[in-house]
Amino acid sequence: MSDHKSQEPKSLFKRLPKIIVPTHYDLTIQPRLDKFTFNGDVNIHLKVKEPTSSIVLYAAELEIDNVTIKSDSKNTQEGKVEYDKESERIAVNFNEKLEVGDYALTLKFVGEINNRMRGFYRNKYTTPDGIEIRYGASTQFEPADCRRAFPCWDEPNFKATFDITLITPKNLRAISNMPVISENEYANDKEWKIIKFDRTPIMSTYLVAFVIGEYDYVETKDLYGVNMKVYTPVGKKEHGQFALDTAAKVLPFYADYFNIQYPIAKADQIAISDFAAGAMENWGLITYRETRLLIDPKFSSMDTRQRVAGTVSHELAHQWFGNLVTMDWWIDLWLNEGFARWIQYLAVDKYYPEFDIWTQYVADVFTTFLISDALKSSHPIEVPIGMFIIKDILY
Ligand SMILES: [Zn+2]
């Protein structure tokens, strides 16, 4: 006999079943920067396609304190939450079976504004005089961290519309994917405001974004009347001008090239003080690492200008390729990224021919690819992707 304990095999990753499909989210978030927490409330409209007494969706690092479901016939019942921390999912169980039909599932929750640059996380910055340290907060959801900000069907092919509301102190800017439709004093506290944003197009959860903090900005309109802003740290708005000029040319170029108008009334870009990747193509609110968006008109090098022009052109391409047309699952991310990488060179070459960017493409992109492809560890473009590996994929 051996004392070797038999281990339960880990169950294989399975995507969420299609018997329950979300169609719309009403999301309200109230951040508390003094405590690095937030309160949230989400009302998810969904279609139940097969009778069930349990709804499974994603939620991670959230404390859920109240769940109710309301049917079309206005019957309301409370649900009990069962957490599966390893798979980052919850099951909401109901005493009475849900029949086929339309429902609204409401969850109230509390989360952490974390310091890990994923989900809804804190941004540390210094006041322009260099004396005081302050915090804002922003989101980074791709590929699988929307679930850290609110419970949701956090897989790219569960597309829905989103009505987002932020409740923040009056002195902070609050920005999201869509234009503001109303801004009022918050009834419960005169020092706070409540900002409602317009409804998003139908889209994946990984593209939802919101940012709060102190920012300056420069703004313009593109050829087709899309409002464009580049948000910068306070006192540095002229550092956003180069990216704004580039974006105002490239956005209408893509609209013409794809023959599809950009579908949102604004296209904002913002420099975030703590940012893990280079940039993130959230629809209508692209977030950047500061060095990928800001140009000091006096001191930035030619190399930095080329990098900023390339990154801006790349993220704007995703507004169509990735955001409007989205891969069914992360296995096809290579197509999304490969196309955006290629067309960024086309756009940069059109507006900055003096960069001679295609020559650099051969040196920087093509030869790098050949090096990876020559390795024994090289693999097919498509590899099966489970839940945990998607956290390490490259964009
Ligand atoms: Zn990309």
Image (spheres, grey):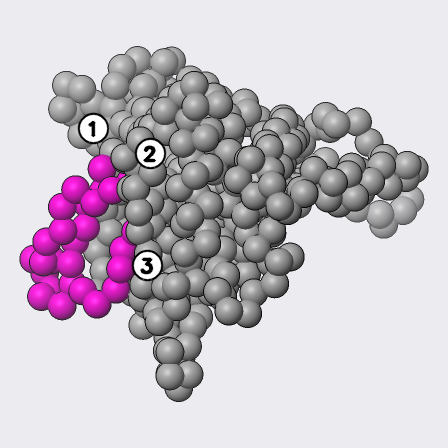
Q: Which residue is mark 1?
A: 70
Image coordinates for residue 27, horizontal then vertical, percent:
27, 42
Q: Which residue is mark 3?
A: 217
> In the rendered structure, does residue 380 fall within the stretch colored magenta?
no
- Left or right of 235: which side holds 381? right
> Which of the two residues, 80 or 152, is positioned nearer the viewer here?
152
Q: Quadrant of residue 180?
A: top left
Instruction: Check disc 3 and give the amino acid type.
Output: Tyr
Q: Which residues are magenta?
A: 170-198
Residue at (54%, 47%) from the top-left corner? 309
Q: Which residue is mark 2?
A: 223
Mark-to-mark CA distance, 1 and 2: 45 Å
> Which of the two residues, 253 or 205, is positioned nearer the viewer here?
253
Residue 18 shows in the view: yes
Mark earlier in primary sequence (3, 1): 1
Mark-to-mark CA distance, 3 and 2: 20 Å
Instruction: Check disc 1 and give the amino acid type.
Output: Lys
Circles 3 and 2: CB atoms closer than 8 Å: no
